[in-house]
Amino acid sequence: MNANPLSPATQVTLLLCSPLRAGRNKDVRTLNIGEFNELEKQLLRLGAPLEQLLETDAATLLKKISPAMDGAKIETLLGRGFMLSMAVEMWQSAGVWVTSRNETDYPERLHRLKQNTPPLLYGCGEKKLLSRGGLAIVGSRDVDEAGEEFAKRAAASAAREDVQVVSGGARGVDQFAMLAALEVGGTVVGVLADSLLRSATSGHAREAIQDGRLTLVSAFDPEAGFNVGNAMQRNKHIYALADFGLVVSSGYNEGGTWSGAIEQLEKLRLTPIFVRGGDDVPEGNRQLLRRDALPFLPEPWPASLREFFGALSQKKVQSMETADLFALHETPLKYHSSRREEALNSSRKRKH
Amino acid sequence: MDSKEIQVKALQLLRQSTGDSQATFRSGQLEAIEHLIERRGPLLVVQRTGWGKSNVYFIAAKLLREQQAGPTLIISPLLALMRNQITAAERAGVRAVRVTSEEKNRDDWGRIRDELLADRVDVLLISPERLGNEEFVQTMLQPVAARIGLLVVDEAHCISDWGHDFRPDYRRITRILKSLPPNVRVLATTATANDRVVADLKSQLGAALTVQRGKLARASLQLQNISLPSEIARLAWLAHTLPKLPGSGVIYTLTIRDARTVAAWLRENGIDAEPYWGGLDEELGQPGLRERLEARLLRNELKALVATTALGMGFDKPDLAFVIHYQLPGSVVHYYQQVGRAGRALPDAFAVLLGGGGDSDITDHFIETAFPPRELVEKILSQLDAAPDGLTLGELQIKLNAPRGRLDHALKLLSLESPAPLLKLDSHWKRTSALLAPSFWERVERLTELRKREQTRMCEYLHARSCLMQFLARELDEDDAPRCGRCSVCRGEPLLAEQFTPTFAERAAQFLQRTHHPIKPRKLWPKDAFSTYQFTGKISESLRAETGRVLAIWGDAGWGDLVRAGKYSTTNRFDDRLVAAVIEMIHEWNPQPQPAWVTYVPSLNRTTLVAEFAERLANHLKLPFHSVLQKTRPSPPQKEMQNSFQQAHNLDGAFTVKPGVGFTKPVMLVDDMVDSGWTFTVCAALLRQAGSGPVFPIALAQTSKSDET
């Protein structure tokens, strides 16, 4: 028989950060990333692991961190244990798993986001794909035909060379790229901003998920509806899970594609950003190229895109925090911040 | 609250709820309450029925509420029978609310929801299948799910894969318990758990599980087994013995049909007995009948309820004087539980097991149909694979030749797997991305094997030569149980005489031959099944058959064997005794308006068998006989059609009425077998369309495949 499918640390993270199927219209406000980071910091100060919040002396612990944190709110959230197991049961039945950032099966790549590392990650499909990196192909929903064809060609070319495609699962560029990669037998990671549960059970994704070629993940409640804030956060997760970004079509100064790419170029710098060039591309593409984005190779492409990426990443992006992107990762990459490493170590020690 | 304070308050609550100012806790009750309040980890209480588990959880719930904790959630399959316990709890100020699947309860949902939201409920009781109902979960459970202070799971042995009792809905409960964080208080209760089951529960609820176990033996029970292979002998023994027994009791049967037959027989013998089964109220159209029957038994106004296992564990009658089993139940544990209801507050009570003969045919049937066959599961999955938007149960019925109940059962079992290969969204069944795990079939095989072993052990119990109570206790791993000194084996002689007066046997044999069964008219045409006849929607009164009669059950102890002989003989003729029996049946039945002529359902394979029988019948009744229906095309035997759609569709366009026939009077429509009743329904509608008067179906034998409890 299986033991509890969730570790106590993941249980606490769910209790504090997940709406647990309650929907958006409830009075209970869960902790946002900032509050959860603060709680971890406070607990670390006391040398107490997260799971101690489930012990009988939790109230004492909460008193000790009281001015910094709203203890009553945390206590209320922690009281949702039955709700938690109801939710987990429902997700599991639909084939959806959940992990938290203190777990070993949480994708290392997301730790690159530091304080923005989502506390929870829900998913459906093989977790292995989340450590494969690959090419993030992104772009707007309302893409023109040239953009659509480009997205499909780029995705298929990458997939043929066993370069994984990472995308957002949205209508338009995202879906064109993902489907094209799957069609030629490639692996795909879809990073969703909403409705993971519905996508995971849809007839279209079923076969690829069963075959282990498609993994859908989301940092947001599996039943969450569309929300602009979540969609913006999601862009970070796409780039964090990939080695390279390719913008197929972007609006100028508007839309998620633009802001996500700008954030990478100016702030996060997790992956180099390539942009489709040429005469007929949208204004956003042109503007990104003026802001340090790299022009993607003009077609016809060389026999090996992989070599192209490799060479470019050597030359131009040494300053970026990135590994040899298309090498096979025999040893998993380590992106842990030292602070989280400490927290992990101390909590592990306590367990034994 | 410190320990002393808990003890004082708990005792006070106990006295309030029992209305007895001197009441004290039974051994183990207070310990269990303290364990829960002080949050010392999950607790399993294994105590016999009647020990007072409800005292533990209602008092714990109340004490937790006084500490500002959220409400207690109790999951039990026996809610319908917990009325007394709830009333007692209310006396102690516990506000308890029950939500069952009964429709009448639905009207209360809004009110209950308001109560929950206003935090005016201390205990919410629900049945296990409620947790699988998305609407219920969203509207009723969400208001309290975030604050559940104590979770109680009744009949906890069902959580185990090794339990004697497999309830699909407990698969979900098992998973809920598994992912429950340690800060939720959990109480699991059961009357019966052997070591294997306890070990299993430990692995589900965590090694920290505390187990509290009481003794199983019941001091007042006197056990006796009687081997009586024939149905006639058992009926005779009951009629002979019951009037001599003091008090009131329960007679358990394996099937609804047996419950009805035995009750009817006892009534004919002047014994106040009533049949009782799960769907009683709906089937007889008498809401609340079950409750009224229970109440009459409680007040000793009935000598006996003749019941299927639907008369469950929550039924609490301390002075129940006897429990008699008309057939061998499926397992010793079931038997122990059922006899355990007798004599709780009596110095003596009888538990008599009648057995032998073909009992295991019935339990075999239960074992074989407990899980869907592989072939059906594969067909369902491949149908759903090919349907991206999913299929409704009705649509599956059109695509697959399988009984509706079987399909429903298979879908439910599969949807309770985790991850589930299919799920139901808005009445459509859809495939998920999960494959059906091989462990599903491993479990099916293991449980089937287990059921067979239990069946064997039950037979061994019937013929046991050592103390019967000890046998039962050991079966539940209570190895140190002493000899009871009260059972027929310990005493070395029967407690109740095994003999009966021969006239009872003669009369029982005649009775069985007189047990006719109604053929109920179908009222709705299956969707899209009759494109040729263009029958759709409700079957109008003017086309509908009247309620008919069937003489026997295929192969039963009355006329069944003689019908079988006629059907499969080379003489191609039903015995004259069957004609006489049908005539007697018609006289007793007295259909109105009186039929004025006779016709029959034609067949292309056996052209004369039914026609010749119907004609003989007509001659004896001195009614005109006319052959008016025609079979226009061969169709596969109706018995091969597995669900309503298939059965109906198979007959579409298969019959016509000869033109120019104008019989306007009421008619008897004769056939040899009746199964789903669709042949009668179609032929009756065609006759009515052709201008006939009301149509009364008559058949020799009913060949329904299943008769579930």
Image (tube, grey):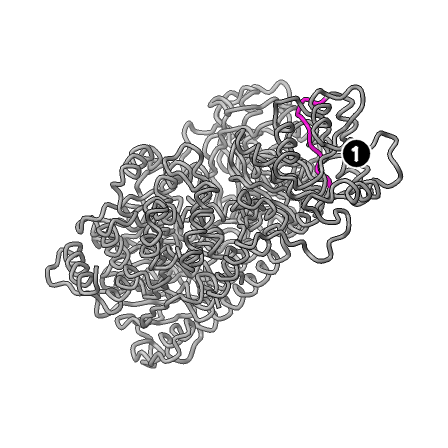
| Residue span colored magenta | A135-143
Residue A202 in percent (x, y) is at: 62, 36
Closer to the camera in the image, B40 or B120: B40
Bin the neighbour count of mark 1 within 10 Å (Cα to Cα): few under 14, some 14-19, many 20 and up. many
Asked whether residue A205 appears in the rendered view, the answer is yes
Closer to the camera in the image, A168 or B69: A168
Closer to the camera in the image, B533 or A150: A150
Residue B232 in percent (x, y) is at: 42, 60
Q: Is residue B293 left or right of residue A176?
A: left
Q: Which residue was labeled with disc 1?
A: A154
Residue B257 in percent (x, y) is at: 44, 50
**Residue at left 64%, top 19%?**
B659
Residue A277 in percent (x, y) is at: 78, 26
Whether residue A333 is situated above or below residue A161 in the rendered picture: below
Closer to the camera in the image, A176 or B268: A176
**Residue at left 53%, top 54%?**
A340
Q: Chain of mark 1?
A: A
**Residue at left 23%, top 63%?**
B246
Quadrant of res A320: top right
Quadrant of res B101: top left
Q: Is B378 inside the magenta-drawn segment?
A: no
Secondary structure of residue under mark 1: helix
Q: Is residue B149 left or right of residue B538?
A: left
Whether residue A297 is situated above or below residue A119 in the rendered picture: above
Q: Is residue B687 left or right of residue A270?
A: left
